[in-house]
Image: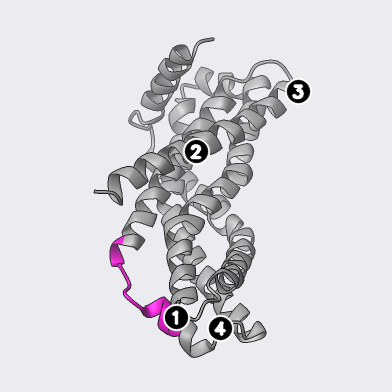
Amino acid sequence: MSIFAHLGKYYVLMAQAFAKPDKFKVVWKRVIDEMVAIGIGSIPIVAILSIFMGAVTLLQMAYNFSNPLVPPYTEGLATRDTMILEFAPTIISLILAGKVGSSIAGNLGTMKVTEQIDALEIMGVNPQSYLIMPKIVAALFVFPFIVVISIFLGTLGGYVASLLTGVVSIEKYVYGIRYDFEAFYVTYALIKAEFFALIITSVSSYQGFITSGGAKEVGDSGTRAVVYSCIIILLFDLILTQLLLTN
């Protein structure tokens, strides 16, 4: 099947997913459940990765900026901006593409091959709206919070590394993360988080809905969901950076 055929089926699926639901109360309950699964369920891995990314970033910056001509607060500033601009929104989204995306594609793929989606249609339920829309809405809501948590914990990881190793004094690190702070960087990170949330959930849902066959095909759908989500995330990372940060 050509890429244009897949794009057409993808847009049709998204149009059906955002059709008016039969019962808003049922959809809202599913949104809450998905927020818990996507948001709360992802916090542990996000916390661990963010702390270590912040710590390693500080150590690498301290090694590369070990020059008397470089201001001593540069390590803290570079760690802060790296976490805000790239690591928190992009790297964390790539990790969540593996965790959340494969789960969505696997669950929907299993429902497809076991004809549970067909059963919903027979009962008069719009399966696209019932199954996909809550996932997308939940991800759009929780991803910005996950990114903010990642930024905070990454900066904290740099602080802990500075405290334990002494490569940078605590005073200089704190001064660096406060120096010349640009608030738009956080806005930029949150905008990327919203785009990446939509990409992960919609692409993974599409891969799940077009699954046919058996268990092997379900696994293949999960793999394709992760691979395609990561590629599109990197593409949109380049596009959004060009649009939002460059003149």
Q: Residue at x 60, y 33 (%)?
A: 227
Q: Are marks 3 and 4 in contact (CB under 8 Å)?
A: no
Residue type for callout 2: Thr
Q: According to the image, label 4 marks what residue?
A: 168
Front in this rendered view, residue 43 or 160: 160
Look at the picture and state if 16 lies above or below 135.
above
Residue 26 visible (yes or no)? no
Q: Nearer the viewer, mark 3 or mark 4?
A: 4
Q: Residues within 10 Å of mark 1 (few under 14, many from 20)?
A: many
Residue type for callout 3: Lys
Q: Which residues are magenta?
A: 174-184
Front in this rendered view, residue 194 or 244: 244
Number of the label disc, if any, that sits on residue 201: 2
Q: Are marks 2 and 4 in contact (CB under 8 Å)?
A: no
Residue type for callout 1: Tyr
Tag 3 secondary structure: helix
Look at the picture and state if 207 lies above or below 162.
above
Q: Residues within 10 Å of mark 2 (few under 14, many from 20)?
A: many
Number of the label disc, if any, that sits on residue 73: 1
